[in-house]
Amino acid sequence: MPSWYDGPIKAQGGIKARTRRGSIGSTWWSRRFIDLLERVCDKGRLSRGRAYARQGQVLSIDLAAGEVRAAVQGSRPDPYEVVIRIEAYDEARWTAVEESIAAQAVYRARLLAGEMPTEIEELFAAMGLDLFPRDLDMDCSCPDWGFPCKHLSAVLYLLAESFDDDPFLVLAWRGRTREQLLGSLADEPAEDPLRVADVPFADRLADFYAPGATAHRPERRPAAVAPDLLLRVFPPPCDLGRALTPAYRGLADA
Amino acid sequence: MRGPGSGGRARAAGAPRPHPFAAPASAVAGALGLDPAAGRLLELLLPGSAGEPLPSPETGRLAEVARPRLRLWEVPAVVPPPADALRVLAGHPGTATLRHWAAVAAFAHDLVRRGRVIPQLVPVPTSTPEPEPASAPEPAGDSVAMWAVPPDGARAVWRPVLTGADATYFRDLALAMPPACRTSRTERPSAEVLRAALEAFTDAGVRRAVTAPLLSKPPRTLQERWLAALTGDAASCPDAPELRQELERWHDAVAASEGGATRVCFRLLEPRDTDDWRVELALQAADDPSLYVPAAQVWSGATGLPGRPERELLTGLGRAVRLYPELDRALRVPEPAELPLDTAGAFGFLRQAAPLLQAAGFGVQLPRWAGRTRLGLKLTTRTKKQSAAAGQGFGLRELVDFRVDLAVGDETISEAELAELARLKVPLVRVRGQWVELDDRQLKAALRAVEGVRAGEASAADLLRQVVQSDDEELPLLEIDADGVLGDLLSGQAERRLAPLATPPGLDATLRPYQERGLAWLSFLSELRLGGVLADDMGLGKTITTLALLVHERAATQTATQTATQTATQTAAPAPAPAPTLLVCPMSLVGNWQREAARFAPGLRVYVHHGSARDAAGIEGADLVITTYGTAQRDLEILRQHEWRRVVCDEAQAIKNSGTLQAKAVRSIPTGTRLALTGTPVENHLAELWSIMEFANPGLLGPRSRFRTRFQEPIEARQDEQATRALKRATGPFILRRLKTDKSIISDLPEKLEVKEWCPLTTEQATLYQAVVDDMLHKIDDSEGIERRGLVLSAMAKLKQVCNHPAHLLKDGSRLAGRSGKLARLEQLAEEILAEGEKALLFTQYAEFGTMLQPYLAQRLDRPVLWLHGGLPKKTRDRLVDRFQHDPEPTLFVLSLKAAGVGLNLTAASHVIHVDRWWNPAVEDQATDRAFRIGQRKNVQVRKLICAGTLEERVDEMIERKKALAERVVGTGEDWLTDLSTEELREVFALTAERVG
């Protein structure tokens, strides 16, 4: 049905915003990024971008040093190209940052444990650098007049969400990936600790119904000192800590 | 036959056949109380012949297929929801496979209780595929496909977190999994099956435990719908890929946390000066905690640790700082090695951080005094001069001087010192060079305590009661310095402090040194009119020590009577005979006691009050009255009317449950003193300990409820050291438990201790026995030569089978429990052996009896019971032997005498039981020697089970009597029996009626 309204083409397999409701920014670093966004584009535009992102119109986002490139399905058959640039720091500056990071084990320890230490922003500032950009150099290939356009807004919103999940993305945008930063300390796939070598059935025909070994009953271990210990050592994603705590408290009496 | 390229997964050829013996699904559902609608038809790989699968051990049938092969069988099955499966498994699982699943369910429950679970979102394929067949009725299948029909595309589930010791146990369980638990159309890996089952069980367990919903309002977002689906019965919710991936990442981070080769360790170091405490950071190898490398060394690079030490140290610290924010200070340097603390900080580490870090899987090492050395009380008592001279006459009614002081560890401190400590207002203080934790509550209690006068005079009995019942948690009784009898008692070392009592005249044996000490201890408690618990390891001679006590007392009374008679005028009336001792034991032990008493204490007048012909008149004039728990309960009123010098409970486990009628009955018989004999380590079973102590010394430990809150719960739930020490002090004076392995005992023991155990026949056994004898005697009258020999041998075999078990003779697959005196005794012995953490070889000459014994004992004792017989392939035998030799778990090994004849090395056993007799000492010794190979260092106890009053006892007597001739007579096996005359046979085979239980 022809329409006078030139709405966006529904994208298939686009990147959808994570939450239908509720807000992003559950961690301090993504909060900082959102503060920035709210400075460069007003709330109304950002929430429009969020709605747009929820429809799955953003087809891809690639993040590299100094540059985020995204493809967004708009009203034309060809997706629009979105580019968001910030300053990527050069080798000399990064070397200095890395030295500062190395000077205090707490940075590496917290980064390895999956969180961004709050002080890292101060560390950058002390060297006259910004961790989070003050300004964004943004561009979209769409003909829209508004700035930022809804395509840009959608990408910004998804970017903020990604930062929420992976603090290392902020650093990667500035020019250092997690692997580069942690060097030899970065992850490597671990062996499955639960794997066992079974005796094949063919060798167990005579005692098919019998245990093949004795499972050594571990000593009965006391219930956790704090029932929600697991939540405290490994904070759950998506701000679920508060919602899950009552469940863990209930387990001690199981 | 293997499928092409199936990599070890066996696959059977041919179309599946219906299992010829399987019960219909509805019958299985009915028997287990499950919904019959859950019935399915599964195809399972099972070993067997073309006609039928091999019987499982629980059928009690010997497999008769020479070369079994894997084939697909159609088996009706019930696939219950996990919650129902948990309920079934919580019952009394009867088969090895169900026991395995019960262990998995228990593991799941433990993980849930400790909060080692993590919520996840699992997508479900929109079109539910045909469920993957699995071993039924066990929940081994793909949990998603089998248990849910999701309308929403995904499910909220609670998954187990398997790290550290839990991962180890997971692997143990996977390796132990019987093949029958993981069979399906193909051979499934045990880890996969175990994980699916464990996930289903943890999910069901959490849902059972968490009853309140996690949302207070109706869910609106995807995340909220997932949260709502985490509790209650409805687990399905819409899929949310981003949330799912987040949760998966979270799960992986948790799961990877303890999988590493090392773990981070925190060690509190005492100050070199006054206030400079430090926590040393370190790495510890996960599989070898003795490999402890301080962080400073990790940074220098040379650690010898596996994995990537720097990374693991940093990651661990990054996690630990979330639990212990103070740690952040230590991480402000490039290569952190320690965290400096002031005294308050050190106290905070001890009390708050350390338990939290430990629970989170970090290593924590505290100084030796931590949690131990604290402020408490010290009791000093001194015997008054004049009564010390009275020596033996001193009793517990005597008055003694006592004083109570404040103490730290074993040092007393003065009021002034206490005031100084209070003034310092620090929680960790050094008192005479020793660090002490001092919290506010304790300090206040101590200040209150010094206000009252704490010295004076009291009876020894009162002080004893005070010590036993002292339960001030703020100011515990730390130290006791007592002399005289009270000192001997309270030291818990009375056995060592008392002069041993030599073998009393009239005892037809020589006591070993530790038995002399045991006798002195029993006699000492007896004179104080206190009850005791003799809990020596089995084989150390509790029976003979008890008999020695009776003989000793009888001799002492007689001497006293004689002396009295001599000094008094000739006209004085003879002193009345002392009251008898009442011994209560399980029926299976009556014959044993009777025989041991006759053999070792022939002078004791013994009356057995048991059986339908019992007559209470026999109690008069007896020194020892033997009865059973059942009879004691039935004849309670009669027994209560008599005066008893002592009541003895043998196998006191029988009264371990204080509420049972038996326990109440035995407790209610009035007596001078009491003695409990038990071979199981009472200190490991606190509820039983209370019950046995309540028998021995009524009221001494206080009421059951108090005992539970004061000792049982703190010790069992928290391994509370202070409660453990307090309990030991409260019960130590009354319990004597010596282990075979004690240095002072082992040198007194022979390398091989041979014991005969006499068992009664049940009425059923006796009736069958008599029928076999009558039948044989009737037949041999008309036969001779080979025919006669054949008849005699066959009758003899039948009689031996009756002695083993009626079902062994009848071969009808009927139930085993409660029908054989020998089996009952075997069970008791096995239970004691396993409770002592040891291994035993059980020999039988009948493969069919071993086949019945193995599943029965495994089920009753819930411990590994291996079974080696001639029908096993060499590989399987070797595996069994290897497992028995190297597995640290207490294990029973049933062996057929013939199959075990050659080449087996079973030196891990410290017990050998000959369940039935071959009557050829050479063959029996050869079997016994399996446990005595080169490399054997420990002592071995050999027991031969003999049914009292039967041919087993008669032949045993003949062998004993003709020791010298024995080898010639019986060296050729059992053929010699056939040469006996009919009259002789009648004598050998006849049943002595009074032996029947």
Image (cartoon, coloured by chain):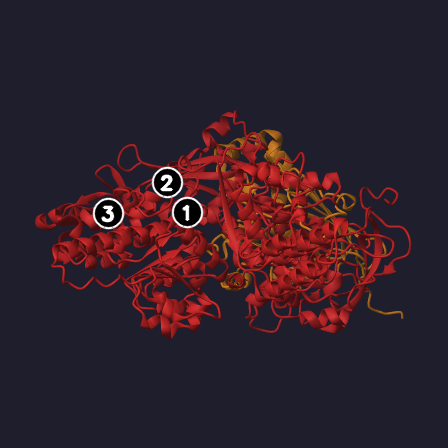
Q: Badge 2 is on which residue?
A: B512
Quarter of the N terminus of chain B within the rendering: top right
Q: Badge 3 is on which residue?
A: B488
**Contact (CB < 8 A) between labels 2 and 3?**
no
Chain containing mark 1 = B
Residue type of the residue flagged with mark 2: Arg
Judged left or right of residue B368, residue B594 is right
Judged left or right of residue B74, residue A113 is left
Q: CA distance from mark 2 to mark 3?
A: 22 Å
Give the camera-side residue of B878 and B333. Answer: B878
Give the camera-side residue of B178 and B252. Answer: B178
Q: Position of residue B722 (x, y in %)?
A: 33, 51
For residue B620, above or below residue B142: below
**Contact (CB < 8 A) between labels 2 and 1?**
yes
For residue B218, above or below residue B122: below
Using the rendered image of the protein, determine whether residue B545 is visible from the camera's viewpoint.
yes
Give the camera-side residue of B590 and B967. Answer: B967
Chain in red, by letter, is: B
Chain A colour in the picture:
orange
Q: Badge 1 is on which residue?
A: B541
Same chain letter for marks 2 and 3: yes
